[in-house]
Image: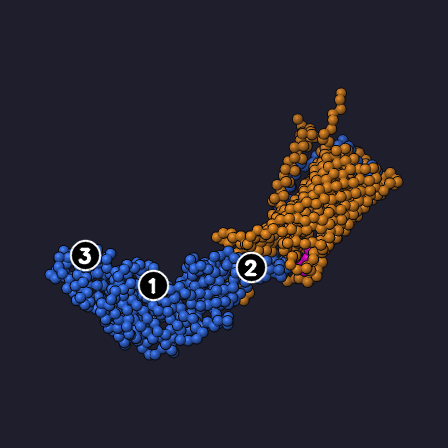
Chain colours: A blue, B orange
């Protein structure tokens, strides 16, 4: 058997052979190891695509689309938030009876003069700069003026907040038109507030007025600029108290049109919209782009001539957690003249992606009207429960994950 | 000291052997990360790899019955009984690949990879030997890229889709072979199979409105198995002739492991779900071969390998294998044959050219995976090689070539034509010898 096993070892050890190019070994090894061609081709794409799938557009219908229960933030001050205090009442052909109660507060514009603090206030008036109107601008707005009895925060004031008020100060009627409207406060109120009006503690002890509508065909918006409380002391001087905080309280609306969902400013916070994107509802996807397009209904033919219907100028989209505590603003976009608007940005895409991977605490989107719009306008959308085709659709650019 | 003297010194040879082995070991990490291979490596656990010895590789890739004192033959642990010298061997493969498919332009790819690293030493010369081996068991190396447009998109937005994979399983083998008699050798080896299978899928856009995404999936597997081997030399043949039969059985085993997946964008990486734990089975492997030496100059081998992948099961999905469906993998069958011509035979003073061994072989390999369950993927190839004796006694440089093709362009499949060049280094010297007194 030894013959079969080539017993060359001892011979090779004794045989002189040509010198091995040992010094070439390492370069050769290196070449074998690192040599490569960095030019991938598409050969085999068909074999892979059959298991993975191509990048494509996926139309995804929303599974729910409804007004949420959270009241809108309606408070504002000179730095942020709403910039109108709305008051009045409108019987809207679509939205029904809209009632807005205004809330206003004032602070002294400057330090009181000694002439003012040394006199007695015998006259006071409110000047409201009305810049916003909704409804019948030929009508008058009747309202009651009520004193506010306790402090309130504009930053947390929502449309369903409760404001503690005293007995009615007076009843007024003003024209539903833009411009400065002056309201003289009754002498009894002036006498009662004489000392407070001249006190250095006015800002802390005076809490403002509620403007409660009684009857009207319009809703007006009072803007900070040029809106003030003026008090005159005798003998002495006139002092101005500027508008420092505003707010609006509203009653919930119910649409007079069936199968319509309303996005109402100064009402509910927004419209909740859900998509079946979570991993349990959808295949795993790489999501590259998400576009959400909406078309508000054109309701012009439902309104009489002369009815001023202020249309929201912009709309926002945020993502909200299941408990409502996490609210991530995504994007605010302008609304086209025909009521169309769409959302399309990287944050939206990433939220969809996280939801698809079941990595997100955010479980729905909310369409809202930005707080600084400060109106009572609304958008109406068709929404038939159970018929997905009338719900909004998101257009996703996706690649199925293999 | 003259350079030749340095070369011939035991110290130098040991250092050189160590240096080359040390060079090859880190190659494990580098070479397996290449993406420049065939799309067929994507499927299953990857393309099955075998590197039993440089000699066997040049003779068709088998060698279950092939005896040799000059090489470490890990095809059959019984062959470890042949060891005379302490021996180190390692090899690298450089592959050029031309891949084509109906409807696509041909692609040309090239890459280098590790063939394997072997070490063996005799406990009792030509009687009992021990061997160690680290070699790829499977290999994944592919990258497919195309530029397309988004299906259904009105805008003409380009998307570059890329699928890639790398990694694979390694087999770390330790075995012992013992010659029971002049005719019968037995061997046993333990094999640890481990590795990382990685695949990635990405879509990239030439438009900033779209977000590029990449999904990477990594599956780490590990497990152990054992092999038994036997080799029988038919007695009674005339001097200079030999007939040997060999067979091995590798037991089925189960690899355990875990899989993680991650989604990557330009702003970071997010894991997909939780780490998934699971198993993957490795089937029984049976190898059998015959070697015939009609004279001292000629050796002929023929081998058959069977792997029962139809029984494969796994908790994980792999490309070409859906664990929820009853889609079986195919049994792998590899048939090979080869011839070696060694002009010098046992003549010690033959010329250098006569001491070169010339080898050739051919093989047919039916793959255990297929992208289409109705199609069998088969590779056919011819091999060849030269074994160059070196200045260092007991050491050879083996240059191999493997020219083959795999698959076809019909039925949406891919046709690969490849040329693999193998550079193998085979050191051998006497270690642990007692110096003669006086």
Disc 2 sits on a residue from what chain?
A
- Residue B393: where, in percent of width, then height? 73, 33
Please tell me whether mark 1 sits on a helix, a strand or a loop. loop
Closer to viewer: mark 3 or mark 2: 3
Q: Please tell me in which quadrant of the rendered image residue A266 appears.
A: bottom left
Q: Is residue B53 left or right of residue B270?
A: right
Q: Indicate yes or no whether the magenta region holds residue B368.
A: yes
Give the CA distance from mark 3 to mark 2. Answer: 67 Å
Residue A369 vertical position relative to residue A24 in the rendered view, above or below: below
Give the CA distance from mark 1 to mark 3. Answer: 29 Å
Which residue is pictured at 55% across the width and 54% down the height?
Answer: B273
- Residue A330: where, in percent of width, then height? 42, 60
Circle 1 residue: A161
Q: Indicate yes or no whether the magenta region holds residue B90.
A: no
**Tally of numbered tags:** 3
Which of the two labelled residues, at mark 2 and mark 1, occupies the earlier sequence position?
Answer: 1
Q: Quadrant of the N terminus of chain B?
A: top right
A245, B386: nearer the viewer? A245
Which residue is pictured at 23% across the width and 71% down the height?
Answer: A171
Which of the two labelled residues, at mark 1 and mark 3, occupies the earlier sequence position?
Answer: 1
Circle 2 residue: A284
Q: Main secondary structure of the magenta part?
A: loop
Which of the two labelled residues, at mark 3 and mark 2, occupies the earlier sequence position?
Answer: 3
Disc 3 sits on a residue from what chain?
A
Disc 1 sits on a residue from what chain?
A
Circle 3 residue: A199
B183, B25: nearer the viewer? B183
Query: Which stretch is magenta?
Result: B367-372
């Amino acid at each position: 058997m030894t013959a079969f096993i080539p017993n060359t070892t001892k011979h090779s050890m004794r045989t002189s052979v040509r010198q091995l190019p040992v010094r070439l070994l390492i370069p050769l090894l290196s070449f074998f190891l690192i040599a490569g061609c960095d030019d991938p081709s598409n050969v085999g794409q068909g074999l892979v695509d059959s298991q993975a799938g191509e990048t494509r557009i996926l139309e995804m219908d929303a599974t729910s689309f409804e007004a949420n229960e959270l009241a809108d933030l309606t408070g504002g001050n000179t730095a942020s938030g709403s910039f109108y205090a709305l008051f009045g009442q409108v019987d809207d052909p679509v939205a029904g009876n809209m009632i807005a109660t205004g809330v206003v507060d004032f602070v002294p514009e400057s330090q009181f003069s000694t002439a003012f603090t040394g006199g007695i206030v015998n006259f006071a008036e409110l000047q409201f700069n009305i810049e916003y109107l909704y409804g019948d601008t030929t009508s008058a707005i009747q309202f009651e003026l009520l004193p506010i009895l306790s402090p309130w925060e504009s930053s947390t004031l929502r449309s369903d907040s409760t404001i503690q008020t005293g007995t009615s100060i007076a009843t007024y009627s003003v024209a539903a038109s833009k411009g400065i409207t002056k309201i003289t406060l009754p002498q009894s109120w002036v006498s009662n507030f004489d000392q407070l009006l001249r006190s250095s503690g006015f800002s802390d002890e005076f809490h403002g007025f509620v403007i409660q509508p009684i009857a009207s065909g319009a809703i007006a918006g009072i803007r900070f600029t040029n809106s003030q409380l003026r008090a005159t002391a005798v003998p002495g001087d006139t002092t101005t108290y500027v508008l420092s905080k505003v707010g609006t309280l509203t009653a919930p609306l119910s649409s007079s049109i069936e199968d319509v969902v309303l996005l109402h400013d100064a009402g509910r916070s927004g419209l909740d919209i859900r998509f079946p994107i979570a991993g349990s509802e959808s295949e795993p996807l790489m999501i590259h782009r998400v576009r959400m397009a909406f078309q508000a209904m054109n309701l012009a033919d439902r309104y009489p001539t002369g009815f001023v219907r202020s249309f929201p100028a912009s709309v926002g989209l945020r993502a909200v957690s299941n408990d409502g505590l996490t609210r991530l603003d995504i994007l605010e976009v302008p609304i086209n003249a025909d009521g169309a608007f769409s959302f399309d940005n990287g944050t939206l895409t990433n939220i969809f992606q996280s939801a698809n991977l079941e990595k997100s605490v955010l479980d729905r989107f909310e369409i809202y009207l930005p707080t600084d719009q400060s109106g009572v306008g609304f958008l109406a959308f068709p929404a038939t429960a159970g018929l997905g085709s009338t719900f909004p659709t998101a257009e996703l650019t996706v690649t199925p994950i293999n | 000291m003259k350079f030749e003297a340095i070369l011939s010194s035991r110290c130098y040879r040991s250092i050189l052997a160590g240096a080359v082995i040390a060079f090859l070991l880190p190659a494990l990490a580098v070479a397996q990360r290449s993406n420049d291979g065939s799309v067929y490596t994507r499927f299953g656990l990857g393309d099955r790899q075998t590197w039993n010895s440089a000699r066997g590789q040049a003779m068709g890739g088998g060698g279950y019955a092939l005896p040799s004192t000059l090489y470490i033959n890990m095809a059959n642990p019984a062959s470890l009984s042949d060891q005379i010298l302490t021996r180190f061997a390692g090899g690298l493969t450089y592959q050029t690949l031309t891949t084509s498919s109906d409807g696509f332009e041909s692609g040309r790819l090239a890459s280098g990879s590790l063939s394997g690293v072997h070490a063996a030493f005799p406990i009792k010369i030509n009687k009992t030997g021990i061997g160690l081996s680290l070699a790829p068991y499977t290999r994944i190396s592919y990258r497919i890229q195309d530029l397309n447009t988004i299906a259904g998109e009105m805008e003409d937005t380009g998307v570059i889709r890329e699928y890639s994979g790398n990694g694979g399983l390694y087999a770390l083998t330790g075995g012992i072979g013992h010659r029971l008699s002049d005719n019968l050798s037995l061997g046993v080896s333990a094999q640890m199979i481990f590795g990382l299978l990685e695949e990635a899928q990405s879509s990239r856009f030439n438009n900033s409105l779209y977000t590029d995404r990449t999904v990477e999936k990594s599956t780490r597997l590990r497990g152990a198995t054992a092999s038994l081997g036997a080799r029988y030399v038919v007695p009674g043949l005339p001097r200079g002739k030999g007939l040997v039969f060999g067979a091995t059985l590798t037991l089925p085993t189960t690899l355990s492991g875990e899989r993680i997946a991650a989604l990557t964008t330009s702003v970071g990486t997010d894991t997909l779900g939780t780490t998934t734990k699971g198993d993957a089975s490795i089937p029984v492997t049976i190898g059998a071969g015959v070697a015939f030496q009609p004279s001292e100059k000629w050796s002929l081998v023929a081998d058959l390998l069977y792997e029962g992948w139809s029984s494969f099961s796994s908790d994980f999905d792999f490309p070409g294998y859906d664990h929820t469906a009853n889609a079986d993998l195919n049994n792998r069958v590899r048939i090979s044959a080869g011839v070696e011509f060694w002009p010098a035979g046992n003549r010690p003073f033959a010329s250098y050219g006569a001491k070169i061994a010339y080898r050739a072989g051919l093989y047919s390999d039916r793959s255990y995976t297929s992208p289409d369950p109705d199609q069998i993927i088969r590779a056919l190839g011819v091999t060849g090689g030269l074994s160059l004796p070196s200045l260092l006694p007991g050491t050879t440089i083996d240059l191999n070539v493997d020219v083959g093709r795999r698959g076809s362009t019909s039925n949406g499949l891919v046709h690969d034509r490849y040329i693999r060049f193998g550079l193998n280094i085979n050191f051998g010297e006497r270690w642990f010898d007692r110096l003669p007194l006086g």
